[in-house]
Amino acid sequence: MTQADDWSDYWRKEGAEGEVFLDGAGGKHPELEAHWRSVFAELAHATTIVDIACGGGSIFTALPDDHTHVLHGVDVSDEALKVCAARHPTATLHLGSAEVLPFEKATFDMAVSQFGIEYAPDKVKAFTAAAACVRPGGRIDCLCHHQKGHIDQKIAPAYTGTQAVLNTNFVSNAIALVHTKKDHHESAHVLARNLFIDSERKVAAAMREARSGIHVHLYGGFKEMFSSFEKYNPDEIVRWLGEMHEEIVRADARYAQMAQAALSETQIDAIKACLVEGGCETVSAEPFFTSTSELPLAWRIQATR
Ligand SMILES: C[S@@+](CC[C@H](N)C(=O)[O-])C[C@H]1O[C@@H](n2cnc3c(N)ncnc32)[C@H](O)[C@@H]1O
């Protein structure tokens, strides 16, 4: 699967719920929304705005209802753009990568991004393209994943868990265990049990580090089903394991992308340098905090051309 396919898969599944104005508990994150409201209030004169890696268009929802801005969004996922189009029918949407923006130089008053532009494999290229599409006097304002931030600290254990499941073939070993038990195939069952015990031990070790997440659900769910084997239809257990496997592969790909997107201080320095080179005069990158964590939620990267 390509990066775009992974994201389309995400947007197809999440639909209208797939947005990042969410807090840790799945509720709306009022502070992120308030942040963008104040950005737009401060830059009321900006009329043409592009959201890079716009997803479902979270940032645009912070504009006043009666705004008259010209909105453009770019995203690598066609499914994201479908969600954005439904929410913001007046926005012009473009399918493509942040690294190669489909705009003339100096087109916009403002380029924004929220947990988006940094997913570009070449981050410097993406910020260079962002700088080029902003007119002199225009502004770049982005919130990006912070490598030592709240989000990335939160996903690290879950990522450890999905990696443990995949690297130990937990699911295929569990399926072999179910089949050999169902078929009363003694010698094969002993072999399957030995293989499963090894992967079980490794996933249990990962659970000491990562006590919640989809791997914990898999581990606990399978343990319960297997220990009460007579209560379940073995084919149902196998089907459940297959579904869990697909979900874990998807989650693992997402965690990998988030980890890859998170910006280190060295990457921030390279981004600042490319913005200066791209003609920006005031360039800054500061940790962005909310009241829900002592760790920064993001880097706020700002520049004026
Ligand atoms: C975490 S979501 C954020 C979406 C949106 N900005 C928001 O705040 O809700 C990341 C988005 O980046 C998009 N994306 C990933 N890689 C991209 C790239 N190279 N170029 C453009 N968009 C990309 C994904 O399709 C996804 O919609």
Image (spheres, grey):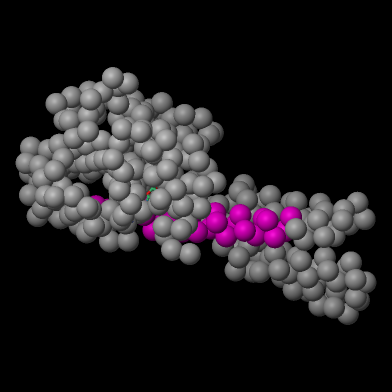
Residue under the image location 62 percent in, 47 percent down:
212
Q: How many marks?
A: 0
Q: Is residue 253 magenta?
A: yes
Instruction: Inspect this view and state whether residue 277 appears.
Output: yes
Rendered view: 238 above or below 169: above
Q: Depth check: give the residue in front, 140 or 283.
A: 140
Q: Which residues are magenta?
A: 240-269
Viewport quadrant of the C terminus: top left
Q: Residue furthest top?
A: 66
Rendered view: 182 above or below 283: below
Q: Main secondary structure of the magenta part?
A: helix
Residue under the image location 75 percent in, 51 percent down:
221
Rendered view: 245 above or below 16: below
Residue 88 image position (x, y, % from top left): 36, 33
Q: Is residue 116 magenta?
A: no
Residue 234 image position (x, y, % from top left): 85, 60
Q: Quadrant of residue 56?
A: top left
Q: Quadrant of residue 160?
A: bottom right
Residue 285 image position (x, y, % from top left): 22, 44
Q: Depth check: give the residue in front, 151 or 172.
A: 172
Instruction: Inspect this view and state whether residue 300 appears.
Output: no
User: Left or right: 74 with respect to 83?
Assistant: left
User: Left or right: 178 with respect to 294?
Assistant: right
Residue under the image location 41 percent in, 57 percent down:
4
Residue 228 image position (x, y, % from top left): 88, 53
Q: Depth check: give the residue in front, 50 or 112.
A: 50
